[in-house]
C-alpha cells in the first residue's frame, strides 16, 4: 500500500459563513489534510475552531501566513484576496479563491468541476470559484448545452441571506424577531453592507444584490452573465439575470428559462439531467415534489425540478434550480476543485 | 345640488383577508353605500365587523341573501361564487367576483380598470376580477402594449402568503415563531390547503401556487397566461409564468421580461409608465430605490422599477413590478370596478 500524500491547507476567512463550511467539507470529505492553518481578519483572530476533534486557534492573515501552504482556500472578500492571493501563490500554494477578485481575469481558470474541470490544469497559482448563483445554474445547464446548445437564458433568482455572509443571517433573524414582537426593525446590513441605504429583508424581497452598474444591472446580475459564458467556454450564450434577495437562510432558488439551439424531447432532458454528475432531479408535480431551499440545505447536490416545455417557444424550456449556496455555491465547489487537484497528482 | 344615489352593497366572504380589505376600501373611498350586508360561511357568521363606526353582524350567505342588493362583491372562493353569483345576479345585483369561477367565461368581462374599463358595460350580471398576480402585471404593461405592442412576456413571481388567505398568513407567522424558538414547524396550509402535501413556507420558497395541470404548469401560472390575453384583448401575446410563494405577508413582486414588437427608447418607456394611471415608477438605482413589497403594503398603486434594457435582445425590456395583492390585486380592483359602474350611472 502506498502512503497517501497529506497537504498543508490554509482557510482564509475561516470564521465566515463560507469559511466555516469549507472546514466542515474538508472534514466530511476526508480531505488529505496534513497541517491546517485557519486565518482571518485581525478582528476574528483568536477564535477557536474545531477540525477532526482538535481545536485550532484562528490567526490573523498576512503576507507571511503562507509558508509551506500547498492549498489555500480564500473566502474573506475580494480586497483580502487581491492583497493576499499573490503572496500565497508566490509561497507555492494553489489558491482557490471564492471571491470575485480573479474570476474574470483571462489568466485565471473559473471552474465548476461538473462543467470545465479541464481548466484546472492551466492555473498559474489561482483558480477562481464562480459566484454561488452562477455555479448551480451552469452545473444544471451543462448537459443541455452539450446536447442541444444553449442560445439564451433568462433567470430570476430567489437568493438566501447567507450569500451575503454571517452578518446578513443574523440580521434576518433579528429583524424577524423584532417584527414578530411588533417592533419596526432598523435594517443594518442588506442589501449591500458598504452602501448607505439599507432595506428590511424580513418578510420582504429586495431586487438588489451587490452594487449597480451604469447599465442598470447589478454586479451580481452581470456575474451571472459573464461567468456563465466563461465557464461554458461559449461567448454566444445570451444571459439575462434578475437577482433578488428573499428571507431564506440557506439555499438559492432560480427560475430559469432556457432557449435551446435544437429541438428536444422532454423525456431526454429529464434523463440527461438525471444522469448528470452532481445533479438530482426532484420533479413529480402529481405528488407535489420539486426542489425546495429548506430541503437542499446541507446537501452538496444541485436540485432541478418543474421541468416543463415552454408553451410559447418550440425550443424553450423552464426549470426550477435549487442548491445550498454555502456548499455547491461556495465551500463544496472549492473543496471539489481541491480534490481534483489532489487526485490529478495521485 | 342633486342628491347622490346610495347603493345597497353586499360583501360575500367579509371575514376573509380580501373581504376585510373590501370593507376598508368602501370606507376609505367614500363609496356611496346605503345599506351594507356582510356575508360569510356558516362558520364565520355572527362575527361583528365595523364599517364607518357602526357595528355589523356577519350573516351566513345563502341563495336568499341578495334581495335588494345592487352591488355584490364576492371573495369567498370559487365554489361559493359558482353557487351564489347566479342567485345574486337574478336578484338584480351586479356581481364583482374576485374568484376564478367566471374569469374565462366568454360572456363575463374580466376587468382591470386601467386596461379595459370599456368591457364593464357588456356585463350580464357578473364582472370578474382578475387574479392578483395578473392584475399588477397587465396594469403596468398596458401602456407599453398600446405604444409598442407586446410580443412576449416571461414572468417569475415572488408572491405573498396573504394571496392564499388569512390562514396562510397565520401559518407563516406561526412557523416563523416555531423556527425562531428552535422547533420544527408542522406545515398545515401551504402550498394548497386542499391538497395532501404541505411544505414549510417560513424561510423557504415554494414553486407551487394552486394545483398542477397536466402540462406541468400550475393553475396560477396558466391564469397569468390566459387572463393576460383576455384582459389585453390580444391572443397573440405569448406569456410564460413561474409562480412562487415566498415568506412575505403582503405584496406580490414580479420579475418581468417583456419583448416588444417595435423598437423603443428607455426614456420613452419611463415616461409612458410615469404618466400611466395607477402606476408609480420607483426607479433610481444610484440611490437604491426600487419597488419593495413592504413599501407597497396598504397603497393602491402598482409600483414599477429596475427598468432596464435587455442586453441580449434589441426589443427586450426588464422590469420589477410590485403591488399590494390584497388591494390592487383584489379589493381595490373590485371596488374600482364598482366605482366605474356607479360613475357611469351618473
Image: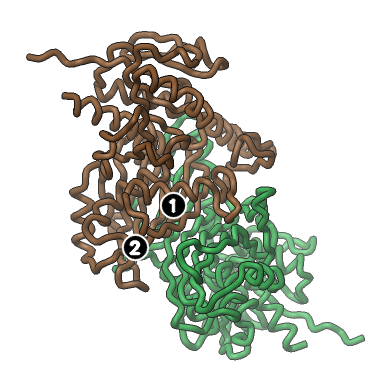
Chain colours: A green, B brown
Judging from the image, what secondary structure is the residue with disc 2 in? strand
B217 to the left or right of B128: right
Query: Does residue B295 lie above or below B87 as drawn?
Result: below
Mark linked to residue B151: 2
Residue B74 in which image quadrant:
top left
Q: Residue at x 51, y 30 (%)?
A: B77
Query: Does residue B26 lie above or below A116 as drawn?
Result: above
Q: Give how far across and how far down residue A318 sits, in percent.
A: 53, 63
The chain letter under disc 2 is: B
Q: Give how far across and how far down residue A42 sits, in percent.
A: 54, 63
Q: Is residue A193 visible?
A: no
Residue at the right extreme of this rendering: A1
Query: Does residue A266 lie above or below A340 as drawn?
Result: above
Q: In which quadrant is the C terminus of chain A drawn?
A: bottom right
A201 to the left or right of A40: left
Mark 2 Cα-neighbour bin, 10 Å: few <14, some 14–19, many ≥20: some
The chain letter under disc 1 is: B
B28 to the left or right of A152: left
Q: Residue at x 27, y 45 (%)?
A: B115
Q: Are marks 1 and 2 in contact (CB under 8 Å)?
A: no
Q: Which residue is mark 1?
A: B225
Judging depth in this view, the residue of A157 and A313 nearest the camera is: A313
Q: In which quadrant is the N terminus of chain A drawn?
A: bottom right
Mark 1 Cα-neighbour bin, 10 Å: few <14, some 14–19, many ≥20: many
Amino acid at each position: 500500500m502506498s502512503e497517501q500524500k497529506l497537504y498543508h491547507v490554509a482557510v482564509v476567512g475561516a470564521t465566515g459563513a463560507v469559511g466555516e463550511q469549507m472546514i466542515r467539507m474538508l472534514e466530511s470529505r476526508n480531505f488529505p489534510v496534513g497541517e491546517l492553518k485557519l486565518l482571518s481578519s485581525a478582528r476574528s483572530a483568536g477564535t477557536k475552531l474545531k477540525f477532526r476533534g482538535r481545536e485550532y486557534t484562528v490567526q490573523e492573515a498576512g503576507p507571511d501566513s503562507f509558508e509551506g501552504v500547498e492549498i489555500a482556500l480564500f473566502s474573506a472578500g475580494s480586497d483580502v484576496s487581491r492583497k493576499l492571493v499573490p503572496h500565497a501563490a508566490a509561497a507555492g500554494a494553489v489558491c482557490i479563491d471564492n471571491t470575485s477578485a480573479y474570476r474574470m481575469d483571462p489568466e485565471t481558470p473559473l471552474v465548476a468541476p461538473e462543467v470545465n474541470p479541464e481548466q484546472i490544469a492551466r492555473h498559474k497559482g489561482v483558480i477562481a470559484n464562480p459566484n454561488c448563483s452562477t455555479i448551480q445554474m451552469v452545473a444544471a445547464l451543462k448537459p443541455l448545452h452539450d446536447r442541444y446548445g444553449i442560445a439564451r437564458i433568462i433567470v430570476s433568482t430567489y437568493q438566501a441571506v447567507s450569500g451575503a455572509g454571517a452578518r446578513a443571517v443574523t440580521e434576518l433573524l433579528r429583524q424577524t424577531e423584532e417584527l414578530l414582537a411588533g417592533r419596526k426593525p432598523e435594517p443594518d446590513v442588506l442589501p449591500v453592507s458598504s452602501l448607505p441605504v439599507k432595506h428590511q429583508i424580513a418578510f420582504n424581497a429586495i431586487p438588489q444584490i451587490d452594487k449597480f452598474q451604469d447599465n442598470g444591472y447589478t454586479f451580481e446580475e452581470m456575474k451571472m452573465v459573464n461567468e456563465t459564458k466563461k465557464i461554458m467556454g461559449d461567448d454566444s450564450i445570451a444571459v439575462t439575470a434578475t437577482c433578488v434577495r428573499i428571507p431564506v437562510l440557506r439555499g438559492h432558488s432560480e427560475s430559469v428559462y432556457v432557449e435551446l439551439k435544437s429541438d428536444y424531447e422532454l423525456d431526454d432532458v429529464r434523463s440527461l439531467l438525471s444522469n448528470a454528475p452532481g445533479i438530482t432531479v426532484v420533479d413529480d408535480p402529481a405528488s407535489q415534489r420539486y426542489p425546495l431551499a429548506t430541503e437542499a440545505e446541507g446537501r452538496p447536490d444541485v436540485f432541478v425540478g418543474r421541468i416543463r416545455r415552454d408553451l410559447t417557444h418550440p425550443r424553450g424550456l423552464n426549470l426550477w434550480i435549487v442548491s445550498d449556496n454555502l456548499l455547491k455555491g461556495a465551500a463544496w465547489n472549492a473543496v471539489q476543485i481541491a480534490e481534483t487537484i489532489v487526485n490529478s497528482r495521485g
